[in-house]
Image (tube, rainbow, N blue to C red):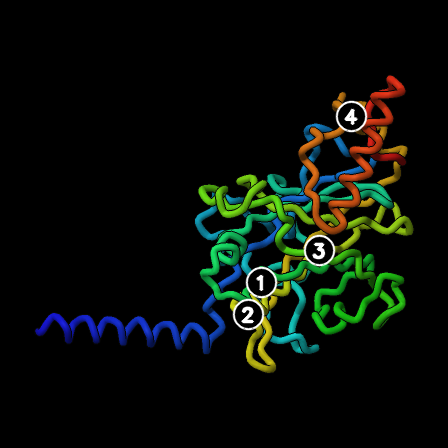
Amino acid sequence: MDSSLKVSRLLGFHYLLLILAILTGAGVDGHSWVDELTCASGPFFTNSPAKGYIRNYVGRQSTQIDELTTYRILDLSSNQPVCPPGSTSPGQSSEFPKLKATPGDLIKASYLENGHIWQTLAGINGPDAKPGTIYWYGTQTPKSDRDIASVLEWTLDGKGGDGEGFLLADTPFDDRVCIETGHEDAEAGRVAGACSSYFRLPETAEVGKDFTVYWLWDYTEHFGPPKPGFIEWYSSCMDITVVSKAEALKEAKNARRDTQPLPADSAPMEGLNRHLRRRQLYNERQNRADGKKSSWFSW
């Protein structure tokens, strides 16, 4: 068979696979999710904080993590569940437990950019490409059939939609610090490693009851403004065990954890993170001047 014919047939076959993947929804571009949660303030905030994970997390060592953890959403209607098929209800393994936190704690979430940032900086996805925005929503009234449309109606004051949840925060997917390993030269100041996004548990969170959190990433404009009607979102669902501050302090003391703050260069400098960083630096300067133990959080 002529070599050019072989190539054309091969290309045609791969093109057909691509079309089938798009039509069936199997083609996934996102490949990002929340890998871990830690407390960034409160009794559990330490140099080596205890980690929490999304529902049914399998770990980066799993060869199936992409297919089991990436959840692509192409429909924002009431027909679209907000959580992946295997995570509509709470569930954790002993290896990857829930995070523990107290009401009002600042929570840090870590995720990998997986090319969505450096490729945008490099112009590979086009001049108008954007890595997207992350929205954090939370509730203590979880439902296995919760749909994304109802979640998107929640507001900061908790009065939106059905009134069963809150918009906790919205932050850029790009924290202006992280970058995929090997692409540190994409922009000055970039550090290889995980990206970070922050949200705060409501002060009104009920102790002794899990707080369910939805990480929603709007990745619709990864190639620039899309065609009318097209959307592309991704989600991760997680539960946080809410405990009292007294219980948390007792647990931290029993574990003999070091309660010194994290290193000064650990806090990103964009959006909500930028304001927290400013506060951290201010308190550190004040504490050094007063000869006090450094601490940028309070409870």
The image's mark for residue 224 is 2
> Which residue position is annotated with label 3?
171
Please state, as top left, top right, bottom left or bottom right, where the N terminus lies in the image: bottom left
Residue 205 drawn above or below residue 280: below
The CA span between labels 3 and 4 is: 27 Å
Say which label, 1 or 3, has the lower sequence index: 1
Mark 1 residue element: loop
Q: Which amino acid does label 2 sit on?
A: Gly
Q: Are marks 2 and 1 in contact (CB under 8 Å)?
A: yes
Q: Between residues 72 and 118, which one lies in front from this camera angle?
A: 118
Q: Residue furthest top?
A: 291
> Which residue position is annotated with label 1?
130
Residue 90 percent coordinates (x, y): 69, 55
For this view, does 204 lie left or right of residue 272?
A: right
The CA span between labels 2 and 3 is: 19 Å
Q: Which amino acid does label 1 sit on?
A: Lys
Q: How crowded is mark 2: few (under 14 residues within 10 Å), some or many (20 or more)?
A: some
Mark 4 residue element: loop
